């Protein structure tokens, strides 16, 4: 019989914010079902004698305590002893991230891994959106500085962002061509995503949560004054929201496609009813924030859909 253990591959709990973190929220919910939570960092994942082993610890989360987690027991664990495994570490989606997906591929037929490691590799969080260009503001993916210069000349204001980063890091609003800046961005990140700037971002974006091929909920995030970044980690404020008919149509289409890709949990973003090209499949966030705003518990939905 498979043990009632959920393993989490993530950033060390000491780096997490219990007020907003989705990983803690998911772990707290499964604890209510009498599951044990085993936690490890990607660097502690190994293949030993054909077994996928993680060196981590059993952990207990408790929102009521000032220190919101307690390490119960350090252990090396054969991950096939778990029923579920959550891939929850933050990007950047670099070679280390990719290597862990190859390692976890070895056991993906023996335990349920969310999201499927092969699917995480296949669904590039920015590039995957290229199939939905008609729902997006004008967008290019390139490392050609001349193409970026031409794109800026056409649209006057553009957003440039890395393809494999996260949380609003290294995103630039450009309205005057700066060869040195753009060369530095390309040197650091390679191919980048450039997009026509949408001024209504000052009213907020919409983060839509997709679980098991369905729209599960949504929040809006309003940038702080003077900012164009809607990430909560960059000071944006969350508010409740409703999706328009168009946003629902696009979300349902993407949710269906992602289910076909074996992506169980994802987050997509809209600005002014346009898909902004972020299709979050590595470690989608926002479930705790939605719960605090509306009392809607998508962690329960998450685990119920997995038929625990």
Image (spheres, helix red, strand yellow):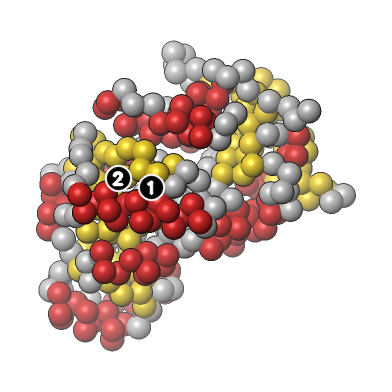
Residue matched to label 2: 207
The C terminus, quarter of image: top right
Q: Residue at x 38, y 47 (%)?
A: 267
- For residue 170, above or below residue 60: below
- Asked whether the viewer can see residue 125, the reply is yes
Q: Nearer the viewer, residue 147 or 272?
A: 272
Q: Nearer the viewer, residue 78 or 173?
A: 78
* Residue 105 as seen in the image, left or right of residue 240: right
- For residue 11, above or below residue 158: above
- For residue 293, above or below residue 15: above
Task: Please rate how many residues cluster around mark 2, counting C-alpha atoms within 10 Å: few if below 14, some from 14 to 19, many from 20.
Answer: many
Task: Please rate how many residues cluster around mark 1, counting C-alpha atoms within 10 Å: few if below 14, some from 14 to 19, many from 20.
Answer: many
Q: Which mark is residue 304?
A: none
Name the image quarter holding residue 297: top left
Name the image quarter holding residue 76: top right
How much space separates mark 1 and mark 2, taking CA atoms?
6 Å
At mark 2, the secondary structure is strand
Q: Nearer the viewer, residue 26 or 171?
A: 26
Q: Position of residue 140 (x, y in %)?
A: 31, 75
Q: How many marks?
A: 2
* View extreme (right): residue: 49
Q: Position of residue 80 (x, y in %)?
A: 75, 39
Q: Earlier in the sequence, mark 1 or mark 2?
A: 2
* Residue 284 as seen in the image, left or right of residue 56: left
- Asked whether the viewer can see residue 271, the reply is no
* View extreme (bottom): residue: 146
Q: Residue at x 55, y 25 (%)?
A: 30
Determine whether label 1 and label 2 are within 8 Å by CB: yes
The N terminus, quarter of image: top right
Q: Residue at x 12, y 73 (%)?
A: 156
Q: Position of residue 303 (x, y in %)?
A: 52, 31
Residue matched to label 1: 267
């Amino acid at each position: 019989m498979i043990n009632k253990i959920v393993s989490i591959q993530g950033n060390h709990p000491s780096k997490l914010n219990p007020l907003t973190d989705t990983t803690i929220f998911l772990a707290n919910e499964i604890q209510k079902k009498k599951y044990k939570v085993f936690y490890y960092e990607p660097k502690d994942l190994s293949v030993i004698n054909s077994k996928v082993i993680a060196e981590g610890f059993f952990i207990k989360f408790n929102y009521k305590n000032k220190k919101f987690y307690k390490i119960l027991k350090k252990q090396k664990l054969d991950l096939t002893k778990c029923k579920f495994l959550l891939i929850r570490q933050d990007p950047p989606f670099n070679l280390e991230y990719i290597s862990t997906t190859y390692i976890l591929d070895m056991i993906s037929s023996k335990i349920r891994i969310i999201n499927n490691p092969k699917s995480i590799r296949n669904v590039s969080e920015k590039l995957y959106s290229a199939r939905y260009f008609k729902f997006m503001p004008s967008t290019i993916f390139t490392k050609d500085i001349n193409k970026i210069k031409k794109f800026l000349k056409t649209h006057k204001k553009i957003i440039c962002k890395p393809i494999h980063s996260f949380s609003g890091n290294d995103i630039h609003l450009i309205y005057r061509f700066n060869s040195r800046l753009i060369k530095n961005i390309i040197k650091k990140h390679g191919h980048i995503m450039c997009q026509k700037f949408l001024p209504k971002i000052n009213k907020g974006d919409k983060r839509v949560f997709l679980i098991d091929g369905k729209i599960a909920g949504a929040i809006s995030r309003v940038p702080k004054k003077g900012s164009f970044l809607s990430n909560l980690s960059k000071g944006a404020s969350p508010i409740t929201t409703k999706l328009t008919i168009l946003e629902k149509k696009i979300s349902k289409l993407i949710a269906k496609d992602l289910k076909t890709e074996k992506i169980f949990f994802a987050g997509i973003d809209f600005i002014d009813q346009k898909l902004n090209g972020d299709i979050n499949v590595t470690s989608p966030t926002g479930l705790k924030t939605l719960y605090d705003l509306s009392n809607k518990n998508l962690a329960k939905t998450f685990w119920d859909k997995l038929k625990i």
